[in-house]
Amino acid sequence: MGISEAQMLDWVSGLLLPLFRIAGLLLSMMVTGTQSVPARVRMGLAFALTVMVLPILPPAPKVDLFALNGFYLIAQESLIGIVIGFVSRLLFQVFVIGGQLVAMQSGLGFASMVDPVNGLSVPVVSQFYLMLTTLLFVIMNGHIFMIELIVHSFTSLPIGTGISLLHIEAVVHWGQLMFNAGLMMALAAALSLLMINLTFGVLTRAAPQLNLFSLGFPITMVTGLVIVWITLSGFLVHFESSYTAAVELMCRLANGC
């Protein structure tokens, strides 16, 4: 009994269309989508996940992958996974922005290191917040939730449906909320450091012989470290609120959990 070319193309399309959606998620989501994870590892993980969940997925539509409609479906499925995974990146950037605001106000912005996630040089405070966020994300099984969500999306958002413009607009709006959340997280530290700088300004005005740079800069840096240590008690609260908002958005993108 031979296998015809049409049957083989149907099997390949039934595997590749879910593969591109899952690969798009792993490409853009945190933990697996960073530059520290090789592309071969991500593709191998995407292929393994697709093979494992393929028996429980709804049957994919039969389409010629080499036709224009096939390329359109591949791009559409990749976009769904990339957009859902991109929300997790926005979640992490909340704390990167908050760390940058604290570092620039306290003078700790001079201490910077290469961020393995984005490949850019960021302040150490932002890198410290990013490490805490990654640990909390993994501890709360955020990566497992996103994999379960992308598998569920094949039922709530069948292949060929696509993401509407309203969903894209919601992601753009959540990017605006990202800056608001980062500012709220760094607001207490920024106001405290502002009061310290104003105090040194008054002292310099009252006693001009004081050297503001030699006296105020070390005190500001030490105070910034103390403020970062004190404000860590509210870090979990900010993470939970941002994580909940990100989960709600990802559920909306997948048409419900």
Image (tube, rainbow, N blue to C red):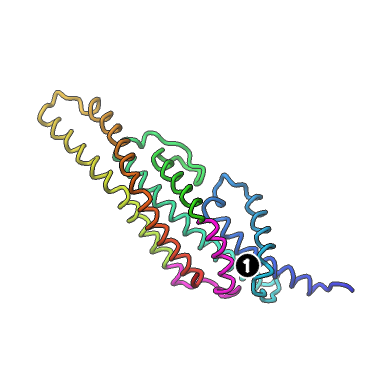
Figure quadrant of the N terminus? bottom right
SS for tag 1?
A: helix
> Is residue 36 positioned above or below 205 on the image?
below
Q: Which residue is pictured at 51% across the width and 69% down the height?
A: 254
Left or right, 169 with respect to 79, comes to left
Q: Main secondary structure of the magenta part?
A: helix
Q: Which residue is pictured at 31% across the width and 44% down the height?
A: 231
> Is residue 32 positioned above or below 212 on the image?
below
**Residue sitting farthest toward the top:** 209
**Residue 168, position as x, y percentages in the image:** 45, 67
Say if the magenta span includes residue 242.
Answer: no
How dense is the environment of label 1, judged by Cα within 10 Å: few (below 14), some, or many (20 and up)? many
Say if the magenta span includes residue 154.
Answer: yes
- As rendered, which of 31 and 212 lies closer to the eye? 31
Left or right, 44 with respect to 85, comes to right
**Residue 132, position as x, y percentages in the image:** 44, 45
- As rendered, which of 71 and 23 lies closer to the eye? 23
**Residue 46, position as x, y percentages in the image:** 64, 58
- As rendered, which of 148 and 88 lies closer to the eye? 148
Which span of residues is magenta-colored? 142-169
Which quadrant holds residue 49? bottom right
**Residue sitting farthest toward the right:** 1
**Residue 62, position as x, y percentages in the image:** 70, 76
**What residue sits right under mark 1 in the picture?**
74
Q: Which residue is pictured at 28% across the width and 48% down the height?
A: 187
Figure label count? 1
The amino acid pointed to by label 1 is Ile
> Is residue 157 positioned above or below 207 on the image?
below
**Residue sitting farthest toward the left:** 206
